[in-house]
Image (cartoon, helix red, strand yellow):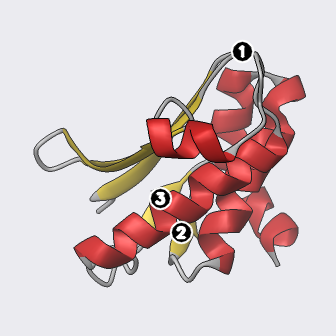
């Protein structure tokens, strides 16, 4: 069962990553470039790039570790990269990949729901 699922929201100005508990529909952990502390550390201006997406992923990973959910209670955090890229558009795929790679590089157990995603995160 997919209990914890990663959801990304990308606009021209902000990048937000949420981990949602599907049992009760609540956001467990969130990270966004709209947060004052993250916004101050970036030089985004009016737009956010892959560097900002990486920072969002790193902050999300740290918060998951603090909550004890970096393993997703042994089941991992589910992510469907193909679906996220499809929803966000092809031009935002570098931002999606930046968040995913930052999570993986910071010790979060990601379970990719799309079979074709494994070759990219290897």
Quadrant (top left, top right, bottom left, bottom right) of the N terminus: bottom left
Q: Residue furthest front?
A: 40
Q: What residue would you read off at disc 1? A: 12
Q: Residues within 10 Å of mark 1 (few under 14, many from 20)?
A: few
Q: Is residue 83 above or below residue 67?
A: above
> SS class of the residue under badge 2?
strand
Badge 2 crowding class, 10 Å Cα cut-off, few under 14, some 14 to 19, many 20 or more, is some
Name the quarter where the C terminus is drawn.
Answer: bottom right
Quarter location, residue 95: top right
Percent x, y for residue 52? 72, 44
Residue 57 in the image: above or below residue 88: below
Image disc number at residue 60: 3
Point out which mark residue 111 bears: 2
14, 79: nearer the viewer: 14
Pick whichever of labels 2 and 3 is earlier in the sequence.
3
Say which of marks 2 and 3 sits in front: 3
Q: Is residue 118 left or right of residue 1?
A: right
């Amino acid at each position: 069962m997919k209990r914890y699922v990663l959801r990304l929201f990308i606009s021209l100005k902000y990048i937000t990553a949420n981990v949602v508990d599907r049992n009760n529909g609540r956001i467990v952990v969130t990270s966004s470039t709209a947060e004052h502390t993250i916004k101050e550390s970036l030089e985004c201006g009016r737009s956010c790039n892959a560097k900002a997406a990486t920072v969002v992923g790193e902050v999300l990973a740290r918060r998951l570790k603090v909550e004890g959910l970096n393993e997703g209670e042994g089941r991992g955090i589910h992510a469907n990269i193909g679906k996220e890229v499809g929803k966000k558009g092809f031009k935002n795929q570098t931002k999606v990949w930046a968040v995913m790679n930052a999570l993986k590089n910071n010790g979060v157990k990601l379970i990719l729901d799309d079979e074709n995603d494994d070759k990219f995160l290897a």
